[in-house]
Image (cartoon, rainbow, N blue to C red):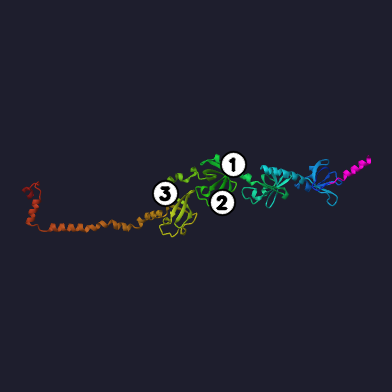
């Protein structure tokens, strides 16, 4: 009986195992880099740290202890030194493959931790499995630097599960697109033209700024950033700035924004400040061949035509003006409907010249004042003729004529009066 039992025990001790076989084992020893298991075979099984987990920082002594039961998979029956090489992570990977297949079929959203940033994308740990997320599927926008995702949890869906080729591909982009689409719809239902909203500057271009409104992006065009002239949006804003903007227009999913509000419109009281005939000082903002645009205040430019720059002939504005120069000119035209103001320096110079003319041209004015004297000779000639007539002898007929001319009402001269 005892001999039979010994034979049976000997037979049991030399049971056969095969590569790929799943066996049960008991932990009989734990070191920093390996775990030793009794798997009921003539040799103990060795489970290295690398075959226990994909996590290189895992602490085996904290994970398992002697006496623990483990289900492992045989990699090699004999490693050349009589030891059986086992794997735990690959067995778990097999289980994970089944889990991935289920998630793929159900389009389930999974959450994993980015353990490595690769050249072409991200390596994400999910349980004991590994999922690769290509760079093109990390976000809905191109991101040159993916290092910010390291050690971060991200959500993804599986687009390919092929365990034989060890291809488990994840996609984060479509989740972002779907989420943004939903948020966009909610935003569009909430906002309306004329509403003030708060947003964050997301991106800057030469023609404007894209503002994240919390669900959709709105475009703040360069022409809508200020009533004044803006040459470069990047000098006015930076990415991350929080701004208050007004909804100017909504066209389908496109949102146009503006910062040009009625309360800060410089033209609302321009008719009072810039009346025709008023002299005003401004700054040369820019020049063209036909004139210079003078900034009277932010948002209001006036045209100083080349013909109105000076009383003297000016070939081109740049001959006498330069950007930033302050000049004083007269408002000669104001059109509130077209928002156009015309200036003239020439008008001021003409007025100043006229004011100086009286002293310089006084002799000419005196000669003009004496012009009526030219008629005096005619008056003198008449006097002379009268004198000649007075001195000429009066004929009898003439005397009769004179007597006849005396009015009858006159009293006759008495002899007494005549004697006296």
Q: CA distance from mark 3 to mark 1?
A: 48 Å
- Say if the magenta span includes residue 296: no
Q: CA distance from mark 2 to mark 1?
A: 24 Å
Q: Nearer the viewer, mark 2 or mark 1?
A: 1
Q: Which x, y percent locates residue 147?
A: 67, 49
Secondary element at image label 2 = loop
Horizontally, is 35 left or right of 283 in the view? right
Q: Which residues are magenta?
A: 1-16
User: Which residue in the protein does label 1 denote?
Assistant: 183
Residue located 59% across and 43% down the image: 181
Q: Which x, y percent locates residue 417?
A: 8, 48
User: Which residue in the protein does label 3 denote?
Assistant: 334
Magenta stretch mostly in which secondary structure?
Answer: helix
User: Which residue in the protein does label 2 denote?
Assistant: 205
Q: Is there a contact, CB below 8 Å, between mark 3 and mark 1?
A: no
Quadrant containing the N terminus in the rendered view: top right
Residue located 61% across and 43% down the image: 178
Secondary element at image label 1 = helix
Secondary element at image label 3 = strand
Q: Residue furthest left?
A: 415
Residues packed near mark 3 inside 10 Å, few (<14), some (14 to 19) or many (20 plus)? some
Horizontally, is 153 left or right of 278 in the view? right
2 or 3: tag closer to the N-terminus: 2
- Say if the magenta span includes residue 3: yes
Residues packed near mark 1 inside 10 Å, few (<14), some (14 to 19) or many (20 plus)? some
């Amino acid at each position: 009986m005892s001999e039979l039992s010994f034979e049976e025990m000997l037979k049991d001790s030399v049971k056969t195992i095969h590569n790929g076989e799943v066996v049960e084992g008991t932990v009989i020893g734990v070191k920093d880099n390996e775990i030793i298991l009794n798997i009921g075979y003539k040799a103990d099984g060795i489970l290295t740290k690398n075959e226990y987990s994909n996590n290189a920082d895992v602490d085996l002594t904290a994970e398992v202890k002697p006496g623990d039961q483990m289900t492992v998979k045989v990699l090699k029956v004999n490693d050349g030194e009589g030891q059986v090489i086992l794997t735990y992570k690959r067995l778990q990977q097999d289980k994970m493959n089944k889990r991935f297949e289920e998630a793929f079929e159900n389009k389930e959203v999974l959450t994993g931790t980015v353990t490595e940033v690769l050249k072409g994308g991200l390596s994400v740990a999910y349980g004991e499995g590994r999922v690769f997320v290509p760079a093109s599927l990390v976000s809905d926008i191109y991101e040159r630097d993916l290092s910010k995702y390291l050690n971060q949890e991200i959500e993804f869906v599986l687009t390919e599960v092929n365990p034989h080729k060890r291809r488990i591909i994840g996609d984060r982009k479509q989740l972002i697109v779907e989420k943004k689409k939903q948020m966009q719809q909610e935003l569009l239902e909430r906002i309306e033209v004329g509403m003030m909203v708060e947003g964050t500057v997301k991106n800057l271009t030469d023609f404007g700024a894209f503002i994240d409104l919390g669900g959709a992006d709105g475009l703040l065009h360069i022409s809508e950033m200020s009533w004044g002239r803006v040459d470069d949006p990047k000098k006015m804003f930076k990415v991350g700035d929080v701004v208050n903007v007004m909804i100017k227009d909504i066209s389908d999913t496109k949102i146009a924004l503006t910062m040009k509000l009625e309360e800060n419109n410089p033209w609302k009281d321009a008719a009072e400040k810039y009346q025709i005939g008023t002299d005003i000082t401004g700054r040369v903002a820019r020049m063209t061949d036909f004139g210079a645009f003078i900034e009277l205040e932010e948002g209001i430019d006036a045209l100083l035509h080349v013909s109105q720059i000076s009383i003297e002939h000016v070939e081109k504005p740049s001959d006498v003006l330069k950007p930033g120069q302050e000049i004083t000119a007269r408002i000669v035209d104001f059109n509130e409907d077209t928002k156009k103001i015309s200036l003239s320096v020439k008008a001021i110079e003409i007025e100043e010249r006229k004011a100086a003319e009286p002293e310089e041209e006084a002799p000419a004015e005196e000669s003009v004042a004496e012009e009526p004297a030219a008629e005096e000779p005619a008056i003198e000639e008449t006097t002379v003729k009268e004198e000649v007539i007075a001195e000429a002898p009066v004929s009898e007929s003439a005397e009769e004529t004179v007597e006849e001319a005396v009015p009858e009402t006159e009293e006759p001269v008495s002899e007494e009066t005549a004697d006296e």
